[in-house]
Image: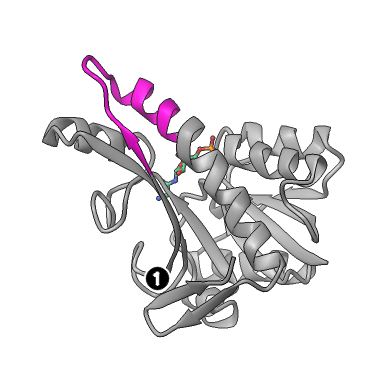
Amino acid sequence: MLRIVVMVSGGGTNLQAIIDGVKNGTITNTEIAGVISNNRNAYALERAEKSGIPNRCVSPKDYESREIFNEKLLEAVDEYSPDLIVLAGFLVVIPPAMIERYRNRMINIHPSLIPSFCGKGYYGLKVHEAALERGVKVVGATVHFVDEGTDTGPIILQKAVETQQGDTPEVLQRRVMEQAEWIILPRAIDLIANGKVRVEGRRTVIEE
Ligand code: GAR
């Protein structure tokens, strides 16, 4: 059984897709050991609670410095003894010590086709605003391992989605979630849980 910890900051629709996937068997061999949020009011925490999944908040507001917050965050993660950390809309800079300890054992969902619309400042709705502003016709989502850079780690899965005339950032965000994120994040977890993802340098090799 792959023990995962899911880290969230907001609504938690990706967390919900994971919970549903584990329940309905789309994700096999996997147990959600816990959910951690930096934001006490994140609806994602309620989703965890409703499904009986251990959850807690570690907020930077509760600590004197970023260094102490980073230590507490890593401690909270370690307490669940995860095999894999899943960043599902976790909008916090990941402490370097956590990247080091969980190298190739931490994945992130990003709402664009990396290397487009990613890196510093590209998160949440901002990604979709930028895509519409640039007028691209194809957008999508990416699941990747987390390394020291922002959205630079080895790519595991990607899925493309078409934009439509008259899209707003909100409408496009929802389509990217429905048609890409909620599909490829559960699939990536299932692949990892079944030992089908290998990292080779900057890339991954998937054995399906
Ligand atoms: C998702 O669209 C996710 O891809 C994005 O935040 C949203 C969280 O939604 N993540 C990033 O932008 C990371 N750079 P959710 O809380 O409903 O899952």
Q: Quadrant of residue 13?
A: top right
Between 31 and 126, the residue placed more toward the observer is: 31
Q: Give left or right: position of 202 versus 164.
A: right
- Residue 137 visible, this angle: yes
Q: Give left or right: position of 39 versus 5.
A: left
Position of the C terminus by quadrant: bottom right
Between 93 and 162, the residue placed more toward the observer is: 162
Q: Give percent across and percent down for residue 125.
A: 34, 34
Give the structural element (helix, strand or loop) at label 1. Answer: loop
Q: Give left or right: position of 204 versus 101.
A: left
Between 159 and 152, the residue placed more toward the observer is: 159
Point 73% across, 34% down: residue? 47
Circle 1: residue type:
Gly
Counting other residues with Cα less than 10 Å from the Cα at mark 1, is it few (<14), some (14-19), or many (20 or more)? Answer: many
- Residue 142 visible, this angle: no
Between 176 and 5, the residue placed more toward the observer is: 176
Q: What stretch is highlighted in magenta?
A: 160-176
Residue 3, relative to residue 26: is it above or below? below
Residue 207 on the magenta span: no
Q: Give percent across and percent down for residue 34.
A: 77, 54
Display colour scheme: one colour
Point 20% across, 37% down: residue? 130
The residue sitting at the front extreme is: 208
Q: Give left or right: position of 201 versus 65.
A: left
For mark 1, what is the residue?
A: 153
Point 60% across, 52% down: residue? 187
